[in-house]
């Protein structure tokens, strides 16, 4: 199969977000499109969910499309809503708490890529803390 330069959301690689918090959809990565320096996903977290606190060894950012919630990073809480962008440096612990009234949908970019591969392989257990 050739590389896709245009990927409709309905053709994304889809699975369960870590902690069963919602759905991930990988649109652009090396396997799908040949992207070597970043990956792009559109994720939806369920209303009222508190995501698991975790970190990644790469930089990443979110762009909020719909819904509201609170981003917890670096010991601080930040309200998030549509048309906001959030940046997380590599290795920064973070978690999202979604407003109970509605789902939260956002674009996430990992640079360099990597965490999306864990999602593909491990789904809901991708970023579990080692026991």
Image (tube, rainbow, N blue to C red):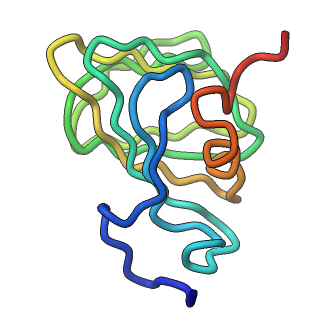
Q: Is residue 12 above or below residue 19?
A: below
State which quarter of the image contains the N terminus.
bottom right
Please name whichever residue, 113 or 27, is drawn nearer the observer in this view of the structure. 27
Q: What is the x, y in percent for residue 84?
A: 30, 40
Instruction: Please state which of residues 4 and 91 is positioned toward the viewer in this rendering.
Output: 4
Quadrant housing residue 49: top left
Please give the name of the residue rendered at 62% of the width and 75% of the height, measured from the top-left corner.
35
Q: Residue furthest right?
A: 131
70 is higher (above) or lower (below) than 87: above
Quadrant occupied by the C terminus: top right
**Residue at horizontal 43%, vertical 12%?**
50
Q: What residue is at 54 percent from the left and 20 percent from the top?
A: 19
* Vertical relation: 108 (above or below) 100: below
Residue 113 left/right relative to 11: right
Where residue 32 appears, as percent x and y from the top left, is 56, 73
Q: How many marks?
A: 0
List the single residue furthest toward the bottom.
Answer: 2
* Residue 2 higher or lower than 18, as above or below: below
Find residue 11 and report its image quarter: bottom left
Across and down, in percent, residue 45 comes to 35, 29
**At 29% across and 11% down in the image, what residue appears?**
48
Left or right, 80 with reference to 56: left
Residue that extends furthest to the left in the rendered view of this protein: 101
90 with respect to 71 (left or right):
right
Percent across and percent down for residue 67 are: 20, 30
């Amino acid at each position: 199969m050739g590389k896709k330069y245009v990927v409709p959301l309905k053709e994304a690689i889809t699975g369960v977000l870590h902690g069963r918090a919602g759905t991930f959809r990988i649109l652009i990565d090396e396997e799908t499109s040949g992207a070597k320096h970043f990956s792009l996903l559109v994720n939806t977290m369920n209303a009222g969910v508190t995501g698991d606190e975790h970190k990644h060894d790469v930089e990443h950012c979110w762009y909020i499309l719909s819904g509201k919630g609170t981003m917890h990073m670096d010991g601080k809480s930040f309200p998030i809503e549509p048309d906001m962008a959030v940046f997380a440096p590599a290795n920064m612990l973070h978690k999202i708490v979604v407003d109970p009234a509605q789902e939260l949908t956002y674009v996430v970019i990992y640079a360099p890529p990597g965490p999306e591969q864990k999602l593909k392989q491990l789904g809901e257990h991708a970023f579990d803390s080692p026991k």
